[in-house]
Amino acid sequence: MNKKTVNDILQMKNVGHKIAALTCYDYVMAKILSSCGVDILLVGDSLATVKLGLDSTLPVTVENIIYHTQAVKRGNDGGALIVSDMPFLSYEASVKDAVYNAGRILKEGGANAVKVEGGAEIADKVSAIVKAKIPVAGHLGLTPQAVNKIGLKVQAKNETARQKLIEDAKILQDAGVFMLTLEAIPEDLAKKVTETLDIPTIGIGAGKYCDGQVLVSDDMLGMFIDFKPKFVKKYANLADTIKSAAEKYISEVKDGSFPAEENVYK
């Protein structure tokens, strides 16, 4: 197995190869997705909505992230780079908290890197985590952990906000992040950031000019049906497939046709 490293992801930008990332939260999905050649498996705090049924990412804990990262690591036979989100309030309060919690996610969870949300205001934390030999990915634009402040809508639509995002991107790069997720921002702004930075940008609702893309797997597979953001493309409709299979199973149990002879030990 050829395990991808942070340097591999950096090199992909240098040679012009697009980076494909998907969220992943469990062993079975990690086995499937990593076997397809996905570059990055993101253990996102999006597990709050798509796995736990919560209405935001805020309640997710470091323990939640460690638990799911462990499962993903066990299934990562394809050697994708595992990046795990640092949840809300696991890094903002102090440099000490940031380094300690990032270290736990790598040491106990088995992640290869952590991801944090925010710009200049967390640069000191990013720098300290990197100095502790822990790779860090950044995240700008729509940052779900700031939902109570900015809402869930397209960001950086006026010139002041655009300039701040560009400046934050440069600050994060200087602080040591090896890649930067750009979420729900205008395509032309994402293009400018991508051309400005030496590190890769990963878009989610940020257009085609980013160095790579990420989607929530449950959205991409048509399993999460509570809502569908504009930037999501459904490559399957597994909700209907699962429902159909479950209905058939229930029917066969009720009418006695399951288990059949081939399903019974003699």
Image (cartoon, rainbow, N blue to C red):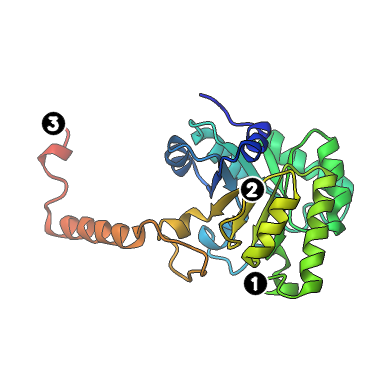
Residue 14 location (% of width, % of height):
66, 37
Residue type at mark 1?
A: Val
Q: Nearer the viewer, residue 76 or 179?
A: 179
Label ID, residue 154: 1
Residue 6 occupies which quadrant of the picture? Answer: top right
Residue 190 location (% of width, % of height):
67, 59
SS state under label 2: helix
Q: Nearer the viewer, residue 211 or 30?
A: 211
Residue 79 location (% of width, % of height):
54, 31
Residue found farthest to the top: 1
Left or right? Give the position of 249 relative to 110.
left
Q: In front of the other: label 2 or label 1?
A: 1
Please indicate, yes or no, whether residue 87 appears anywhere in the rendered image. no
Please indicate, yes or no, whether residue 103 appears anywhere in the rendered image. yes
Give the residue at x 81% y 42%: 176
The residue indicated by pointer 2 is 65
Q: Nearer the viewer, residue 184 or 260?
A: 184
| First in sequence: mark 2 vs mark 3 | 2
Q: Which quadrant would the C terminus be assigned to in this image?
A: top left
Q: In front of the other: label 1 or label 3?
A: 1
C-alpha gap between disc 2 and disc 3: 44 Å
Residue type at mark 3?
A: Lys
Give the residue at x 73% y 42%: 178
The residue indicated by pointer 3 is 266
Q: In front of the other: label 2 or label 3?
A: 2
Crowding at label 2, few (<14), some or many (≥20) Cα neighbours within 10 Å? many
Crowding at label 3, few (<14), some or many (≥20) Cα neighbours within 10 Å? few
Circle 1/circle 3 CB separation < 8 Å? no
Left or right? Give the position of 88 relative to 220.
right
